[in-house]
Image (cartoon, helix red, strand yellow):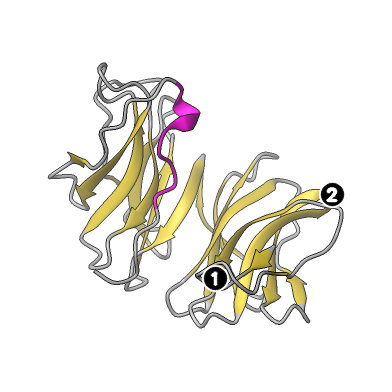
Amino acid sequence: IYVMNADGSNQRRLTDNPASDSSPAWSPDGQSIVFISTRDKNQEIYVLRVDGMEQTRLTDLPSQENYPVWSPDGKTIVFSSFGEGNAGIYAVDADGSNFRLVLHGPLHNPAWSPDGTWIALDGEPQGCNFEVFVMKADGSAMRQVTHHPEGCGSYNKHPTWSPDGKQLIYSSSDRDPNLPGTLLMKINIDGSGETALTRIRVEKTYNSPHYPCGSPVP
């Protein structure tokens, strides 16, 4: 894990081990970074101080942990776990306490709403194709937001929130036969107003736009 100034200057390394450290995400106060690492053989969630002086392991599961994100108030980290019968969205307090299952199932890519009351995510609870869902932060009131017109084998994934919390931005595959690959889409959280944001012709889906990230201000 490295950090640098926004203009690319002052690059410095924060972690140094032979394992893979990846998927960094800032705490709201900018003092810590959550990330995933294979340093203890299994992929787990860690937090480090930006000064590099303290690194803390938050999870210890036989499954694979991924996609960690901070709550807007900086108190909670949610993440996805899959494999070993533990698939689902989990939460843990930023100090490593109060570890809990939020919702069980093949669910991934959690994203907090700006006010911290909702979590967007993607998943395939029906075992057919990935769609975008929202649920309350405690795992209740889950509902499906997107409905891919192509059905099984396609996907809507990687949701992120608009700054006002009224829309979701996400990647969607195979929407247009004239534009193969993946497009970025937006939709109102009630499922209305779905609109394409990109019109990029690509030959392979791995060259397509994925993992959108919105500005924290309009």
**Tag 2: Cα neighbours inside 10 Å, few (<14), some, or many (≥20)?**
few
The residue tagged 1 is 26
**Amino acid type, callout 1:** Trp
Per the rendered image, the range of residues in magenta is 204-212
Image quarter where the N terminus lies is: bottom right
Residue 33 placement: quadrant: bottom right
Task: Please indicate whether residue 162 sits to the left or right of residue 80 in the image.
Answer: left
Above-or-below relation of 127 to 6: above
Point 56% across, 67% down: residue: 8
Residue 50 placed where, x, y %?
A: 66, 78
Above-or-below relation of 81 to 50: above
Secondary structure character of the magenta stretch overall: loop
In magenta stretch: residue 211: yes
The residue tagged 2 is 41
Point 24% across, 46% down: residue: 186
**Tag 1: Cα neighbours inside 10 Å, few (<14), some, or many (≥20)?**
some
Residue 9 placed where, x, y %?
A: 60, 71
Point 79% across, 49% down: residue: 42
- 1 or 2: mark nearer the eye: 1
Residue 145 placed where, x, y %?
A: 26, 44
Residue 62 placed where, x, y %?
A: 76, 48
**Which residue is more in the foreground, 142 or 41?**
41
- Rounded to the nearest angstrom, the CA distance separating label 1 from label 2 is 24 Å
